[in-house]
Image (cartoon, rainbow, N blue to C red):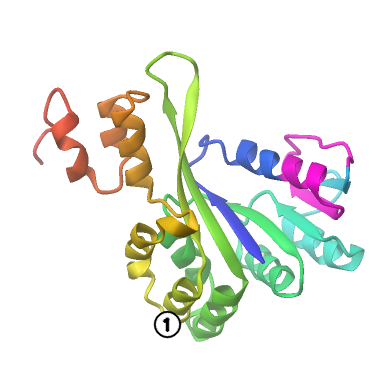
Amino acid sequence: GLVLVTGPTGSGKSTTLAAMMDYANKNRKDHILTVEDPVEFVHKSQSCIVNHREVGVHTKSFASALRGALREDPDIILVGEMRDLETIALALEAASTGHLVFGTLHTQSAAKTVDRVIDVFPANQQAQIRTTLSEALKGVVAQNLFKRIDKKGRMAVLEILVVTPATANLIREGKTFQIPSVIQTGKKYGMQSLDDAILEALIAKKISAEDAYDKAIVKDRFVQYLKTPPDIL
């Protein structure tokens, strides 16, 4: 299956993925292969065997590393960046053939992530890709970093989409605009929307109202918390 960690540049995606790899390395008995540009975290083999590939050093591109990876029989593949059609297509192929694939995109929400993957492909392939993605995608974590009010660094705020059969149907049918409402009703599966997570952090006095408003998706929910109302455009 495919798990995507998304967010703007500098939102801590690599750190989240490194934590996931570390957890797998300690708790599973798998072969992990990472493809990165550059390698940011070096994992020593623990319960798993871990191999790192750096683009420009060990391999020409993410796509060529992925093609090679499929011959090495890894259980888990980390793709540092899914930048282009070829890399995304190969990651989907790997995820559909029994590998657990982790990848990153620069999208700000789970729904936009699904759209981004599909929109990379030519129009005549998109119906097929929707079906493939609906079967392969297992989850999306969309994250953003916020400065902590207590000045103790920054904290990650996460949107979490778990692909249930209902979510898979929406992806297959091209109804990704309904994904936010699936997230709202999917709390029992561990789902949460970015705005709900931001609001929770704001009410707990961990982040500022200005930062919350700035990074929220539906900004109207946060106007009441601002000291000075935003400029009306």
**Relative image position of residue 122 (x, y in whole percent):** 52, 78
**Relative image position of residue 54 (x, y in whole percent):** 80, 44
Tag 1, which secondary structure? Answer: loop
Query: Can the viewer see residue 56 in this picture?
Result: no
Q: Residue at x 47, y 80 (%)?
A: 172
Task: Identify the residue under disc 1.
Answer: 173
**Foreground residue, 92 or 222?**
222
Q: 176 left or right of 228?
A: right
**Foreground residue, 106 or 144?**
144
Q: Which residues are magenta?
A: 21-46
Q: 173 left or right of 136?
A: left
Q: Residue at x 78, y 49 (%)?
A: 34
Q: Does the magenta portion include 32? A: yes
Dot 1 amino acid type:
Glu
> Going by the picture, which residue comes out furthest to the left?
232
> Going by the picture, which residue comes out furthest to the front?
188
Q: Is residue 184 above or below residue 96?
A: above
Q: Residue at x 37, y 75 (%)?
A: 175
